[in-house]
Image (cartoon, grey):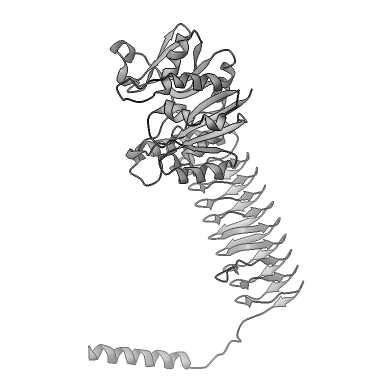
Protein backbone atom coordinates (compact mmCIF):
# COMPACT_ATOMS: atom_id res chain seq x y z
CA UNK A 1 0.00 0.00 0.00
CA UNK A 2 1.16 3.51 -0.77
CA UNK A 3 1.35 5.63 2.34
CA UNK A 4 2.28 9.19 3.22
CA UNK A 5 2.99 10.74 6.59
CA UNK A 6 1.79 14.12 7.78
CA UNK A 7 3.44 15.01 11.09
CA UNK A 8 2.06 18.00 12.97
CA UNK A 9 4.88 19.99 14.58
CA UNK A 10 3.70 23.59 14.56
CA UNK A 11 2.99 24.22 18.24
CA UNK A 12 5.03 26.58 20.38
CA UNK A 13 4.64 24.56 23.57
CA UNK A 14 4.14 27.48 25.96
CA UNK A 15 4.15 25.20 29.01
CA UNK A 16 7.70 24.08 28.16
CA UNK A 17 8.90 27.62 29.00
CA UNK A 18 11.60 27.36 26.36
CA UNK A 19 13.02 29.09 23.30
CA UNK A 20 13.26 25.64 21.69
CA UNK A 21 10.17 24.41 19.80
CA UNK A 22 8.36 21.76 21.81
CA UNK A 23 8.89 19.00 19.24
CA UNK A 24 12.67 19.51 19.32
CA UNK A 25 13.05 18.75 23.01
CA UNK A 26 15.01 15.49 23.21
CA UNK A 27 14.05 12.09 24.52
CA UNK A 28 16.79 9.46 24.53
CA UNK A 29 19.14 11.75 22.63
CA UNK A 30 16.83 12.68 19.74
CA UNK A 31 14.12 15.33 19.33
CA UNK A 32 10.57 14.08 19.87
CA UNK A 33 9.89 14.88 16.23
CA UNK A 34 12.52 12.35 15.13
CA UNK A 35 10.90 9.62 17.22
CA UNK A 36 7.64 10.20 15.35
CA UNK A 37 9.39 10.32 11.97
CA UNK A 38 11.32 7.12 12.73
CA UNK A 39 8.16 5.21 13.68
CA UNK A 40 6.45 6.29 10.47
CA UNK A 41 9.54 5.54 8.38
CA UNK A 42 9.05 1.81 8.97
CA UNK A 43 6.04 2.02 6.62
CA UNK A 44 8.38 3.16 3.84
CA UNK A 45 6.20 6.18 3.04
CA UNK A 46 6.20 7.70 -0.42
CA UNK A 47 6.04 11.15 1.20
CA UNK A 48 6.80 12.59 4.63
CA UNK A 49 5.39 16.05 5.27
CA UNK A 50 6.18 17.93 8.47
CA UNK A 51 3.88 20.82 9.32
CA UNK A 52 5.97 23.44 11.16
CA UNK A 53 4.97 26.74 12.70
CA UNK A 54 6.82 28.17 15.69
CA UNK A 55 10.55 28.47 14.88
CA UNK A 56 9.92 26.74 11.56
CA UNK A 57 13.57 27.05 10.47
CA UNK A 58 14.76 25.06 13.47
CA UNK A 59 12.12 22.39 12.91
CA UNK A 60 13.05 22.23 9.22
CA UNK A 61 16.74 21.75 10.00
CA UNK A 62 16.00 18.89 12.41
CA UNK A 63 13.56 17.16 10.07
CA UNK A 64 15.86 17.31 7.06
CA UNK A 65 18.85 16.15 9.11
CA UNK A 66 16.93 12.93 9.75
CA UNK A 67 15.26 12.59 6.34
CA UNK A 68 16.65 14.71 3.55
CA UNK A 69 13.65 13.89 1.35
CA UNK A 70 11.04 15.11 3.84
CA UNK A 71 8.93 18.15 2.94
CA UNK A 72 8.36 20.87 5.52
CA UNK A 73 5.37 23.18 5.17
CA UNK A 74 4.46 26.06 7.44
CA UNK A 75 1.22 26.75 9.28
CA UNK A 76 1.45 30.50 9.75
CA UNK A 77 -1.71 30.73 11.88
CA UNK A 78 -2.60 28.20 14.60
CA UNK A 79 -6.21 27.53 13.65
CA UNK A 80 -6.52 23.90 14.70
CA UNK A 81 -5.43 20.43 13.65
CA UNK A 82 -7.60 20.24 10.54
CA UNK A 83 -6.16 23.53 9.36
CA UNK A 84 -2.65 22.21 10.07
CA UNK A 85 -3.18 19.07 7.98
CA UNK A 86 -4.64 21.20 5.18
CA UNK A 87 -1.24 22.90 4.83
CA UNK A 88 0.14 19.56 3.55
CA UNK A 89 -2.24 19.46 0.59
CA UNK A 90 0.15 21.03 -1.98
CA UNK A 91 2.97 18.69 -0.94
CA UNK A 92 0.70 15.66 -1.49
CA UNK A 93 -0.86 16.79 -4.77
CA UNK A 94 -1.37 13.76 -7.01
CA UNK A 95 -0.82 11.24 -4.21
CA UNK A 96 -3.55 8.59 -4.19
CA UNK A 97 -2.62 6.42 -1.21
CA UNK A 98 -3.30 6.45 2.53
CA UNK A 99 -2.25 9.38 4.69
CA UNK A 100 -1.33 8.83 8.34
CA UNK A 101 -1.48 11.92 10.52
CA UNK A 102 1.00 11.80 13.41
CA UNK A 103 2.07 14.29 16.07
CA UNK A 104 5.58 15.49 16.76
CA UNK A 105 4.89 15.73 20.50
CA UNK A 106 3.54 12.15 20.73
CA UNK A 107 6.78 10.23 20.23
CA UNK A 108 5.95 6.68 21.32
CA UNK A 109 3.38 5.38 18.83
CA UNK A 110 4.90 2.07 17.75
CA UNK A 111 5.54 0.96 14.16
CA UNK A 112 3.37 -2.12 14.71
CA UNK A 113 0.44 0.11 15.65
CA UNK A 114 0.85 2.22 12.52
CA UNK A 115 0.95 -0.96 10.43
CA UNK A 116 -2.38 -2.04 11.97
CA UNK A 117 -3.88 1.32 11.08
CA UNK A 118 -2.62 1.11 7.52
CA UNK A 119 -4.03 -2.40 7.17
CA UNK A 120 -7.39 -1.33 8.61
CA UNK A 121 -7.61 1.47 6.06
CA UNK A 122 -8.05 -1.17 3.34
CA UNK A 123 -11.57 -1.88 4.58
CA UNK A 124 -12.50 1.44 6.21
CA UNK A 125 -12.59 5.01 4.97
CA UNK A 126 -11.32 6.57 8.21
CA UNK A 127 -9.24 4.82 10.87
CA UNK A 128 -8.64 6.40 14.29
CA UNK A 129 -6.13 5.29 16.92
CA UNK A 130 -7.78 5.00 20.32
CA UNK A 131 -6.84 3.81 23.80
CA UNK A 132 -8.56 2.91 27.04
CA UNK A 133 -7.57 5.64 29.45
CA UNK A 134 -6.99 4.96 33.13
CA UNK A 135 -7.97 8.58 33.72
CA UNK A 136 -9.84 9.95 30.67
CA UNK A 137 -9.47 13.50 31.94
CA UNK A 138 -9.75 16.00 29.11
CA UNK A 139 -9.11 13.61 26.22
CA UNK A 140 -11.50 13.54 23.29
CA UNK A 141 -13.97 10.65 23.50
CA UNK A 142 -14.62 8.03 20.80
CA UNK A 143 -18.35 7.47 20.33
CA UNK A 144 -19.13 4.00 18.93
CA UNK A 145 -22.14 2.19 17.53
CA UNK A 146 -21.08 -1.41 17.85
CA UNK A 147 -17.73 -1.64 16.07
CA UNK A 148 -18.36 1.49 14.00
CA UNK A 149 -16.97 4.84 15.06
CA UNK A 150 -19.68 7.49 14.87
CA UNK A 151 -17.79 10.57 16.03
CA UNK A 152 -15.02 12.01 18.14
CA UNK A 153 -16.19 14.52 20.72
CA UNK A 154 -13.72 16.95 22.25
CA UNK A 155 -13.94 17.20 26.02
CA UNK A 156 -14.97 20.85 25.89
CA UNK A 157 -17.95 19.96 23.73
CA UNK A 158 -18.88 16.63 25.33
CA UNK A 159 -22.04 15.90 27.30
CA UNK A 160 -21.91 14.27 30.72
CA UNK A 161 -22.84 10.94 29.08
CA UNK A 162 -20.04 11.30 26.52
CA UNK A 163 -17.51 12.26 29.22
CA UNK A 164 -18.23 8.93 30.92
CA UNK A 165 -16.71 7.12 27.91
CA UNK A 166 -13.20 5.76 28.64
CA UNK A 167 -12.20 4.99 25.03
CA UNK A 168 -10.20 8.07 24.10
CA UNK A 169 -8.73 9.66 21.02
CA UNK A 170 -4.95 9.72 20.44
CA UNK A 171 -5.26 12.11 17.49
CA UNK A 172 -3.58 9.71 15.05
CA UNK A 173 -5.73 9.17 11.94
CA UNK A 174 -5.40 7.21 8.69
CA UNK A 175 -7.46 8.14 5.64
CA UNK A 176 -7.28 8.09 1.85
CA UNK A 177 -5.57 11.29 0.74
CA UNK A 178 -8.30 12.54 -1.60
CA UNK A 179 -11.03 11.80 0.93
CA UNK A 180 -9.02 13.35 3.78
CA UNK A 181 -8.76 16.75 2.14
CA UNK A 182 -12.36 16.59 0.95
CA UNK A 183 -13.51 16.04 4.52
CA UNK A 184 -11.21 18.77 5.84
CA UNK A 185 -12.82 21.21 3.42
CA UNK A 186 -16.12 20.55 5.19
CA UNK A 187 -14.82 21.07 8.73
CA UNK A 188 -16.13 24.17 10.51
CA UNK A 189 -14.87 26.00 13.57
CA UNK A 190 -18.22 26.25 15.34
CA UNK A 191 -17.09 24.84 18.66
CA UNK A 192 -16.02 25.99 22.12
CA UNK A 193 -12.44 26.69 21.02
CA UNK A 194 -13.24 28.24 17.64
CA UNK A 195 -10.79 25.85 15.96
CA UNK A 196 -10.91 23.52 12.97
CA UNK A 197 -10.75 20.07 14.54
CA UNK A 198 -9.35 17.19 12.50
CA UNK A 199 -11.47 14.90 14.66
CA UNK A 200 -14.63 16.29 13.01
CA UNK A 201 -13.86 14.34 9.84
CA UNK A 202 -15.22 11.18 11.46
CA UNK A 203 -18.76 12.54 11.85
CA UNK A 204 -18.55 14.11 8.40
CA UNK A 205 -17.51 10.79 6.87
CA UNK A 206 -20.35 8.95 8.63
CA UNK A 207 -22.83 11.55 7.39
CA UNK A 208 -21.72 10.71 3.85
CA UNK A 209 -22.40 7.03 4.49
CA UNK A 210 -18.70 6.18 4.78
CA UNK A 211 -17.15 3.82 7.32
CA UNK A 212 -14.96 4.68 10.30
CA UNK A 213 -13.31 2.39 12.81
CA UNK A 214 -10.93 2.36 15.75
CA UNK A 215 -7.59 0.61 16.15
CA UNK A 216 -6.51 0.50 19.79
CA UNK A 217 -3.10 0.57 21.44
CA UNK A 218 -1.68 0.73 24.95
CA UNK A 219 -2.11 4.08 26.63
CA UNK A 220 1.68 4.39 27.01
CA UNK A 221 2.04 4.76 23.23
CA UNK A 222 -0.15 7.85 23.22
CA UNK A 223 1.81 9.76 25.84
CA UNK A 224 1.97 13.39 24.78
CA UNK A 225 4.51 15.91 26.05
CA UNK A 226 3.45 19.44 26.93
CA UNK A 227 5.67 20.34 29.89
CA UNK A 228 9.11 19.70 31.33
CA UNK A 229 7.57 17.34 33.87
CA UNK A 230 5.92 15.33 31.10
CA UNK A 231 9.22 15.35 29.18
CA UNK A 232 10.92 13.77 32.19
CA UNK A 233 8.12 11.21 32.43
CA UNK A 234 8.52 10.41 28.74
CA UNK A 235 12.28 9.96 29.14
CA UNK A 236 11.71 7.60 32.07
CA UNK A 237 9.11 5.65 30.11
CA UNK A 238 11.44 5.26 27.14
CA UNK A 239 14.36 4.14 29.28
CA UNK A 240 12.25 1.59 31.16
CA UNK A 241 11.01 0.05 27.92
CA UNK A 242 14.44 0.10 26.24
CA UNK A 243 16.21 -1.48 29.22
CA UNK A 244 13.58 -4.21 29.43
CA UNK A 245 14.05 -4.96 25.73
CA UNK A 246 17.83 -5.33 26.19
CA UNK A 247 17.40 -7.69 29.13
CA UNK A 248 14.97 -9.75 27.07
CA UNK A 249 17.50 -9.85 24.23
CA UNK A 250 20.23 -11.30 26.43
CA UNK A 251 22.18 -8.21 27.52
CA UNK A 252 23.42 -8.14 31.12
CA UNK A 253 22.56 -4.98 33.05
CA UNK A 254 23.50 -5.42 36.73
CA UNK A 255 21.95 -2.03 37.59
CA UNK A 256 19.55 -1.30 34.71
CA UNK A 257 18.07 1.86 36.21
CA UNK A 258 21.49 3.55 36.03
CA UNK A 259 22.04 2.90 32.31
CA UNK A 260 20.76 5.51 29.84
CA UNK A 261 20.12 4.54 26.23
CA UNK A 262 19.57 6.49 23.03
CA UNK A 263 16.72 5.98 20.59
CA UNK A 264 18.95 4.07 18.17
CA UNK A 265 21.25 2.19 20.58
CA UNK A 266 22.02 -1.35 19.36
CA UNK A 267 23.62 -3.87 21.75
CA UNK A 268 24.27 -7.55 21.03
CA UNK A 269 23.51 -10.38 23.42
CA UNK A 270 26.00 -11.50 26.07
CA UNK A 271 27.30 -7.96 26.32
CA UNK A 272 27.71 -6.62 29.85
CA UNK A 273 26.79 -3.01 30.55
CA UNK A 274 27.98 -2.01 34.02
CA UNK A 275 26.32 0.73 36.12
CA UNK A 276 26.15 4.39 35.17
CA UNK A 277 26.88 4.06 31.46
CA UNK A 278 25.39 6.66 29.11
CA UNK A 279 24.75 5.97 25.42
CA UNK A 280 24.40 8.93 23.09
CA UNK A 281 23.02 8.58 19.54
CA UNK A 282 24.65 6.31 16.99
CA UNK A 283 26.19 3.55 19.14
CA UNK A 284 26.45 -0.09 18.10
CA UNK A 285 27.93 -2.70 20.43
CA UNK A 286 28.48 -6.22 19.16
CA UNK A 287 27.85 -9.39 21.16
CA UNK A 288 30.19 -10.33 23.97
CA UNK A 289 31.62 -6.88 24.69
CA UNK A 290 31.91 -5.27 28.11
CA UNK A 291 31.21 -1.61 28.84
CA UNK A 292 32.46 -0.83 32.29
CA UNK A 293 31.03 1.68 34.74
CA UNK A 294 30.77 5.42 34.22
CA UNK A 295 31.58 5.39 30.50
CA UNK A 296 30.00 7.70 27.92
CA UNK A 297 29.60 6.55 24.31
CA UNK A 298 28.35 8.40 21.24
CA UNK A 299 28.57 7.75 17.50
CA UNK A 300 30.84 4.74 17.86
CA UNK A 301 31.09 1.03 17.06
CA UNK A 302 32.45 -1.57 19.47
CA UNK A 303 33.23 -5.05 18.20
CA UNK A 304 32.96 -8.45 19.81
CA UNK A 305 35.15 -9.14 22.84
CA UNK A 306 36.22 -5.54 23.43
CA UNK A 307 36.32 -4.01 26.89
CA UNK A 308 35.69 -0.30 27.39
CA UNK A 309 36.14 1.65 30.61
CA UNK A 310 35.63 2.34 33.40
CA UNK A 311 35.38 6.10 32.91
CA UNK A 312 36.01 5.97 29.16
CA UNK A 313 34.64 8.36 26.59
CA UNK A 314 34.09 7.25 23.01
CA UNK A 315 33.15 10.09 20.66
CA UNK A 316 31.80 10.02 17.09
CA UNK A 317 33.92 8.08 14.65
CA UNK A 318 35.50 5.77 17.22
CA UNK A 319 35.69 2.29 15.66
CA UNK A 320 36.90 -0.51 17.91
CA UNK A 321 37.73 -3.88 16.32
CA UNK A 322 37.64 -7.23 18.12
CA UNK A 323 39.27 -7.64 21.53
CA UNK A 324 40.33 -4.02 21.90
CA UNK A 325 40.99 -2.66 25.39
CA UNK A 326 40.09 0.95 26.21
CA UNK A 327 40.65 1.72 29.86
CA UNK A 328 40.02 4.35 32.49
CA UNK A 329 39.94 8.02 31.59
CA UNK A 330 40.65 7.39 27.91
CA UNK A 331 38.99 9.50 25.21
CA UNK A 332 38.82 8.32 21.59
CA UNK A 333 37.43 10.32 18.67
CA UNK A 334 37.38 9.61 14.93
CA UNK A 335 39.88 6.79 15.28
CA UNK A 336 40.16 3.19 14.07
CA UNK A 337 41.49 0.81 16.72
CA UNK A 338 42.50 -2.52 15.18
CA UNK A 339 42.13 -5.99 16.83
CA UNK A 340 43.90 -6.55 20.11
CA UNK A 341 45.19 -3.00 20.52
CA UNK A 342 45.27 -1.49 24.00
CA UNK A 343 44.71 2.09 25.12
CA UNK A 344 44.48 1.51 28.83
CA UNK A 345 45.11 4.69 30.81
CA UNK A 346 44.65 8.45 30.73
CA UNK A 347 45.12 8.93 26.98
CA UNK A 348 43.56 10.91 24.15
CA UNK A 349 43.42 9.31 20.69
CA UNK A 350 41.88 11.53 18.01
CA UNK A 351 41.97 11.40 14.20
CA UNK A 352 44.13 8.31 14.30
CA UNK A 353 44.66 4.72 13.22
CA UNK A 354 46.00 2.30 15.82
CA UNK A 355 47.35 -0.95 14.37
CA UNK A 356 46.59 -4.48 15.55
CA UNK A 357 48.23 -5.42 18.83
CA UNK A 358 49.64 -1.94 19.46
CA UNK A 359 50.07 -0.78 23.06
CA UNK A 360 49.43 2.87 23.89
CA UNK A 361 51.09 3.91 27.14
CA UNK A 362 49.45 5.96 29.87
CA UNK A 363 49.15 9.67 29.20
CA UNK A 364 49.69 9.42 25.44
CA UNK A 365 48.16 12.23 23.40
CA UNK A 366 47.71 12.50 19.65
CA UNK A 367 48.17 16.23 19.11
CA UNK A 368 45.75 16.40 16.19
CA UNK A 369 44.69 20.06 16.10
CA UNK A 370 46.89 23.00 15.14
CA UNK A 371 44.26 25.62 15.85
CA UNK A 372 42.88 25.55 12.30
CA UNK A 373 43.14 22.04 10.85
CA UNK A 374 42.90 18.47 12.15
CA UNK A 375 45.77 16.10 11.32
CA UNK A 376 46.10 12.31 11.28
CA UNK A 377 48.28 10.01 13.37
CA UNK A 378 49.10 6.49 12.18
CA UNK A 379 50.44 3.96 14.68
CA UNK A 380 51.47 0.64 13.14
CA UNK A 381 50.74 -2.90 14.24
CA UNK A 382 52.51 -4.04 17.41
CA UNK A 383 53.94 -0.60 18.05
CA UNK A 384 54.70 0.29 21.67
CA UNK A 385 54.07 3.92 22.60
CA UNK A 386 55.76 4.83 25.86
CA UNK A 387 53.88 6.61 28.63
CA UNK A 388 53.41 10.36 28.30
CA UNK A 389 54.29 10.43 24.59
CA UNK A 390 53.07 13.42 22.61
CA UNK A 391 52.48 12.49 18.95
CA UNK A 392 52.38 15.75 16.99
CA UNK A 393 50.30 15.02 13.91
CA UNK A 394 50.64 14.44 11.07
CA UNK A 395 52.96 11.62 12.02
CA UNK A 396 53.45 7.96 11.10
CA UNK A 397 54.78 5.37 13.53
CA UNK A 398 55.85 2.18 11.76
CA UNK A 399 54.97 -1.42 12.64
CA UNK A 400 56.79 -2.69 15.70
CA UNK A 401 58.28 0.72 16.52
CA UNK A 402 58.71 2.08 20.03
CA UNK A 403 58.75 5.55 21.53
CA UNK A 404 60.49 6.36 24.81
CA UNK A 405 58.41 7.60 27.72
CA UNK A 406 58.03 11.37 27.83
CA UNK A 407 58.93 11.84 24.15
CA UNK A 408 57.50 14.51 21.87
CA UNK A 409 57.40 12.86 18.45
CA UNK A 410 57.27 15.31 15.56
CA UNK A 411 58.69 13.16 12.74
CA UNK A 412 57.83 9.78 11.26
CA UNK A 413 59.34 6.70 12.93
CA UNK A 414 60.28 3.76 10.73
CA UNK A 415 59.25 0.17 11.47
CA UNK A 416 61.03 -1.51 14.42
CA UNK A 417 62.86 1.71 15.35
CA UNK A 418 63.14 3.26 18.81
CA UNK A 419 62.41 7.00 18.91
CA UNK A 420 63.55 9.19 21.81
CA UNK A 421 62.74 12.88 21.86
CA UNK A 422 63.42 14.38 25.27
CA UNK A 423 66.05 16.59 26.87
CA UNK A 424 68.93 14.84 28.66
CA UNK A 425 68.66 14.58 32.44
CA UNK A 426 70.89 17.01 34.37
CA UNK A 427 71.74 16.44 38.06
CA UNK A 428 73.29 19.12 40.33
CA UNK A 429 74.37 17.72 43.74
CA UNK A 430 73.11 19.63 46.79
CA UNK A 431 71.16 22.11 44.68
CA UNK A 432 67.75 21.00 46.02
CA UNK A 433 68.77 21.68 49.64
CA UNK A 434 70.22 25.08 48.78
CA UNK A 435 67.13 26.03 46.76
CA UNK A 436 64.74 25.08 49.59
CA UNK A 437 66.80 27.05 52.13
CA UNK A 438 66.73 30.10 49.90
CA UNK A 439 62.98 29.87 49.38
CA UNK A 440 62.25 29.38 53.09
CA UNK A 441 64.38 32.41 53.97
CA UNK A 442 62.54 34.50 51.40
CA UNK A 443 59.18 33.39 52.81
CA UNK A 444 60.21 34.19 56.39
CA UNK A 445 61.38 37.68 55.39
CA UNK A 446 58.09 38.28 53.59
CA UNK A 447 56.10 37.26 56.71
CA UNK A 448 58.13 39.59 58.99
CA UNK A 449 57.49 42.47 56.65
CA UNK A 450 53.72 41.94 56.78
Quadrant where the image shows the N terminus: top right
Residue at figure coordinates x 75%, y 75% from the top left: 417
Q: Is residue 224 left or right of residue 377?
A: left
Residue at 41%, 37% in the rendered image: 76
Residue closest to the eye, 229 or 85: 85
User: Relative to 333, is 176 above or below?
Assistant: above
Foreground of the two, 200 or 387: 200
The percent coordinates of residue 199 (x first, y second) are 42, 20
Image quadrant containing the C terminus: bottom left
Q: Locate residue 15: give its quadrant.
A: top left
Q: Residue furthest top?
A: 146
**x and y, in percent, of residue 230 in the image:** 37, 36
In the image, residue 2 sits, relative to residue 66, either above or below, namely above
Residue 346 position within the rendered picture, expressed as x and y whole percent measured from the top left:
55, 64
In this image, 220 relative to 287: left or right?
Answer: left
Task: Return the residue nearer the eye: 88 or 373.
Answer: 88
Instruction: Choose between 91 and 334: the one closer to the eye.
Output: 91
Q: Which image quadrant is residue 403 in?
A: bottom right
- x and y percentages locating residue 434 in the rendered image: 43, 93
Whether residue 309 is visible to the viewer of this picture, yes or no, is yes
Most extreme residue toward the left is 450
- Number of dots carrying numbers: 0
Q: Is residue 315 above or below residue 73?
A: below
Query: Does residue 248 show up?
Result: no
Relative to 353, residue 79 above or below: above
Amino acid sequence: MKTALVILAAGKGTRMNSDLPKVLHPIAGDPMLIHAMAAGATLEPAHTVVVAGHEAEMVTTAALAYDGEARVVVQTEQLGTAHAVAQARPALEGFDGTVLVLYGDTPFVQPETLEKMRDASVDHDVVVLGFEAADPGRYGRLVLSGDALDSIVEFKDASEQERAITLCNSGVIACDATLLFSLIDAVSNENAAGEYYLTDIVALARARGLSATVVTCDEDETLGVNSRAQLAEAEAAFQTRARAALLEDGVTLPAPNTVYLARDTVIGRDTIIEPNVVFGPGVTVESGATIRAFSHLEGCHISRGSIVGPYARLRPGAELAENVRVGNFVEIKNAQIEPGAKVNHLSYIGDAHIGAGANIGAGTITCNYDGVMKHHTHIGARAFIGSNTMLVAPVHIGDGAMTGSGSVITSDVEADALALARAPQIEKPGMARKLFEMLKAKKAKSQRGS
